[in-house]
Image: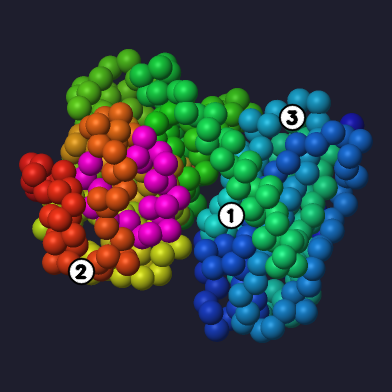
């Protein structure tokens, strides 16, 4: 027998009314920040015999053992078991953590995978809210929403920094990589349908992601396989099937079916989007993009920066500054939020010439995506070690130095058609 949990045992309120709540630095008791320290959030399918339903464990210090205003590590592993459970559903359940944790009064959550950020307010803390209560919320929400597939659920929350490092690097990242690899064999041409995702409409009411095999959602957490699983788990949920039978313009990736879907799911706010262009009818951005790509006029190319990189870009803007002009669910030609994994895609701004346009990335991001980017550049343009031609902050953070570097490397963007 399945029992719906209606009352979650926590000392603060839990309701969707708190979803958009923001907690300012001065109002916060403690925070957790995956872009600065090791964090992770993960669902793991295990055998029913291996878990105890509703067991919640905190490994490491509780919130009252953390300094006021401090930045800490957190990694929570939600173990689930059920005879209808499939590993394909894991990322779908994971992506809902964002909503669940945000529904807690006085708790704010953003990001996903190993890049989440959580703040607990002083008010929530003073009311008795502790880290173990995050476990209660995750347990109850997962059991409620995924009762069709989850029979038993146990939550382990690590706050011990060494354990967080271990979970992140030895458990979470290999899991995320494995998921990403499964997509490698799929292309946009090889599937019959794409999917919409409107999970972010709580924050960006008109935002719609169109998720294809070669273009994952801009949060980096919703691949085409995830969107498909979401649709199977909840046919009336955030991910809907979009047919692709009526192409308008193959070059920019525009379809009548996709436009109709986007019009419907944005309640008329958006008329048309392309899948492969950042200049013509680009897809909108909500707020949770992993990266932002923006045009760099002096080199005819584009600069990409990511959330973890706090420094300056050759566009004269930092990630937060670029984010403030790119987000909000409106189309901003020339600027686009996207997932990290999209950078190595053959469909990355294909309409403007593809990844050959990339002239700058933060070094760490470049290293992360190098293998895929180099493989794609070799296949599409016959260029070896393309990332060696791409600038980073150790080479230049202003356009003049960057162009001098690109000229020396004979970067292909310099001789391409202007983008504007
Ligand atoms: Fe869905 Fe896009 Fe939001 Fe990711 S960014 S959750 S794909 S709407
Ligand atoms: Zn979003």
State the residue position of label 2: 398
Q: Residues within 10 Å of mark 3 (few under 14, many from 20)?
A: some
User: Residue 10: where, in percent of width, then height?
Assistant: 79, 63
The label on residue 219 is: none
- Residue 378 within the segment the image draws in magenta: no
Is 122 located above or below residue 313 in the figure? below
Residue 326 visible in the current orientation: no
Q: Nearer the viewer, residue 175 or 277?
A: 175
Tell me how far mark 3 sits from mark 2, CA to CA. Answer: 51 Å
- Alpha carbon distance from label 2 to label 1: 30 Å
Task: Tell me the quadrant of the picture where the N terminus can be found.
Answer: top right
Magenta stretch: residue 358 in it?
Answer: yes
Q: Which residue is mark 3?
A: 85
- Looking at marks 1 and 3 on the same chain, the residue that comes earlier in the sequence is marked by 3
Residue at x 79%, y 55% (from the top left corner): 156
Colour scheme used in the picture?
Answer: rainbow
Q: Picture coordinates of residue 115 (x, y %)?
A: 55, 57
Asked which secondary structure carries label 1, the reply is: loop
SS of the residue at dot 2?
A: loop
């Amino acid at each position: 027998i399945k029992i719906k949990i209606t009352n979650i045992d926590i000392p603060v309120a839990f309701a969707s009314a708190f979803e958009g709540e923001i907690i300012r630095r001065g109002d916060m008791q403690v925070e957790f920040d995956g872009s600065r320290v090791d964090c992770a959030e993960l669902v793991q399918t295990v055998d029913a015999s291996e878990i105890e339903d509703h067991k919640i464990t905190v490994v490491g210090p509780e919130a009252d053992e953390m300094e006021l205003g401090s930045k800490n590590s957190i990694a929570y592993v939600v173990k689930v078991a059920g005879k209808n459970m499939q590993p394909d559903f894991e990322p779908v359940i994971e992506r809902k953590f964002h909503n669940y944790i945000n529904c807690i009064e006085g708790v704010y959550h953003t990001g996903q995978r190993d890049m989440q950020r959580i703040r607990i307010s002083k008010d929530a803390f003073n009311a008795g809210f502790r880290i173990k209560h995050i476990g209660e919320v995750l347990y109850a929400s997962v059991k409620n929403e995924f009762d069709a597939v989850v029979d038993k659920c146990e939550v382990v929350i690590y706050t011990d920094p060494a354990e967080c490092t271990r979970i992140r690097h030895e458990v979470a990242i290999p899991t995320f990589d494995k998921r990403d690899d499964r997509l490698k064999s799929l292309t946009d041409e090889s599937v019959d349908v794409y999917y919409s995702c409107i999970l972010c409409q709580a924050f960006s009411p008109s935002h719609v992601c169109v998720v294809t095999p070669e273009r994952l959602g801009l949060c980096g957490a919703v691949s085409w396989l995830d969107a498909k699983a979401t649709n199977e788990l909840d046919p009336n949920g955030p991910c809907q099937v979009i047919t692709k039978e009526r192409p308008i313009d193959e070059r920019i990736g525009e379809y009548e079916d996709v436009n109709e879907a986007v019009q419907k799911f944005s309640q008329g706010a958006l008329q048309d989007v392309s899948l492969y262009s950042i200049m013509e009818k680009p897809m909108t951005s909500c707020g949770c993009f992993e990266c932002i790509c923006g045009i760099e006029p002096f080199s005819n190319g584009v600069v990409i920066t990511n959330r973890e990189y706090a420094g300056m870009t050759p566009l004269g803007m930092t990630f937060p500054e670029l984010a403030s002009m790119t987000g909000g669910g409106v189309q901003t030609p020339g600027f686009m939020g996207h997932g990290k994994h999209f950078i190595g895609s053959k469909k990355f701004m294909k309409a403007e010439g593809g990844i050959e346009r990339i002239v700058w990335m933060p070094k760490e991001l470049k290293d992360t995506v190098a293998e895929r980017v180099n493989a794609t550049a070799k296949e599409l343009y016959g260029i070896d070690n393309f990332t060696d031609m791409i600038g980073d902050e150790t080479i230049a953070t202003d356009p003049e130095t960057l162009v001098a570097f690109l000229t020396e490397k004979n970067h292909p963007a310099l001789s391409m058609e202007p983008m504007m």
